[in-house]
Image (spheres, helix red, strand yellow):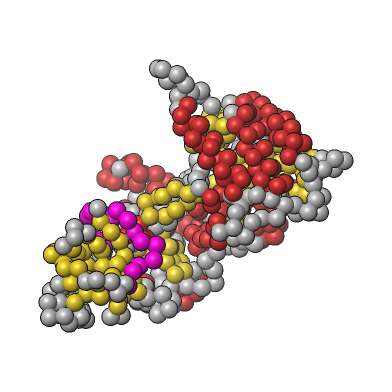
Amino acid sequence: MSARTLLVWCPDWPVIALEITEGVPASTPVAVLHANRVIACSESARAEGIRRGLRKREAQSRCATLTVADHDPGRDARAFEPVVAAVEEVVAGVEVVRPGACAVAARGPARYFGGEEQAAERIVEQVAQVCAVESQVGIADGVFAAGLAARAGRIVPPDRTTQFLAGLPIGTLSRPALTDLLRRLGVRTLADFAALPAGDVLARFGFDAALAHRLAAGRDHRPLAVRQPPVDLAVTETYSDDPLDRVDAAAFAARSLAERLHERLAGHGLACTRLGIEAITAHGQELHRVWRHDGLLTAAAIADRVRWQLDGWLSGTNRRPGVGGAAPMAPPTAGIVRLRLVPEGVLAHVGLQPGLWGETGEERERAHRALNRVQGILGPEAVVTAVPSGGRSPADQIRLVPWGDERVPARSTAPPWPGRLPAPAPAVVLPAPLTAEVRDGTGAPVGVSARLQVSAAPARLAIGGGTPVEIVGWAGPWPIDERWWAPGEARRRVRFQVCLADGAALLLSLAGGQWAVEAIYD
């Protein structure tokens, strides 16, 4: 007999995760895509006719205000962690089935809270209060049946799971290839599938189909793989009697706290790669900064980063004017009374292999220390590095991120990006395009029609009202029509590559009758 299982399900989780992490309101039409098809959408999007499985263009044609985003399993998992932690506060032995769903054995919570219904209500209330997330609970025999019960918000009585599953459509197995074949064979419900002989199902459809056959019959005997709550590795120190308001005192505190953190990590066989530094002043001001490192932070490296950060906070030099578009950060109005170090990224510490002629990466480590020192004084935006990103224009294909931050592209580089310029890429992308004029051999302005017909061959180029230069070669036009469904954000233009008589090669664009120089080739 399958164990009684309580499953917590958060509807439309990829959409909710997008709201939590990126602030996209789930109350508006939103769709999350994978392989150019909708895999999740908001309630307001469903009201506009959006459904799972629709292609992106079909979904956008049904709702002009639809916000679309690529599916990111990592984002879903990160956003779901607080929900799991909230459930663990009231019940023990939680298994994460997938981002958006977690399960627990129902027996313990039911006995503690006085019944399965009371346990379900308590967990839903806990998730709503702690995470402000809507959830539903289902209870049945086995994880599979409990998941289907959660979607209906039902508690299936003991020993009635087979009857509950019997009338459900075959598509609930979530195996598209198998269910499509079964439908063509006349198998429409889980009861029809469960009625087939198990040996024949294995011989005809294979092992995965045999597993699905057991689920359809209500024989889900897999035990829950409960999650072990993470160990609290953070270290904290309070300075209520003598707040830290001098750099020398902060440096001493940083060394002591860093050694404690390093010892705690070493006791669990771990090493830190991303360090969170949190501070609270006597006036209640909260300060927070995350330091990242692509190697393993030693005790000395942790102490250095804490000292640099405290120096930056206490001296008010965390950001210079003009960096990141922000004014310098004023120093705290009172001394620091609480300091906390949180290892936000850890790895199993298996040691580092020394180099053949000296320590591995000594030069790179010195460079990292210098750049991190600059960031500690001027702020993280003072040192940036380029990350390749997806896009159609050269300016869209590079994203600048602070040194040490995760080098994650703003857009996926996988799609073909129709309208993208052919190789090679420009060597220099101008921060602001330069106005220009392009004229033909007779001196008339060159234009492009709605059918992409060039009025005449470009012959001369004048940049910013300067002296015209002869064009000796050109290619194009390459049209681009972006975000046409959002009038306020729509961009429509054509691009040309030109070679000039003086040897220069430029990327030109034409939009609204105005020519501009966007980039320069080597």
Residue 329: x and y in percent read 66, 55
Q: How many marks?
A: 0
Residue 433: x and y in percent read 35, 67
Residue, x 47% and y 26% (percent of image)?
Answer: 362
Residue 49: x and y in percent read 41, 76
Asked if residue 228 lies left or right of residue 207, the reply is: right
Q: Nearer the viewer, residue 163 or 483?
A: 483
Residue, x 16% and y 67% (percent of image)?
Answer: 471
> From the viewer's perspective, is residue 414 above or below residue 478?
above
Q: Nearer the viewer, residue 14 or 434?
A: 434
Residue, x 73% and y 30% (percent of image)?
Answer: 256
Q: Residue 398 sits in which quadrant?
A: bottom left
Q: Residue 154 sits in which quadrant?
A: bottom right
- Residue pushed farthest front? 467
Q: Residue 434 sits in which quadrant?
A: bottom left
Residue, x 22% and y 74% (percent of image)?
Answer: 438
Residue 262: x and y in percent read 64, 29
- Residue pushed farthest right? 241
Q: Give yes or no for residue 425 being in the magenta stretch.
A: yes
> From the viewer's perspective, is residue 107 above or below residue 21?
above
Residue span colored magenta: 420-436
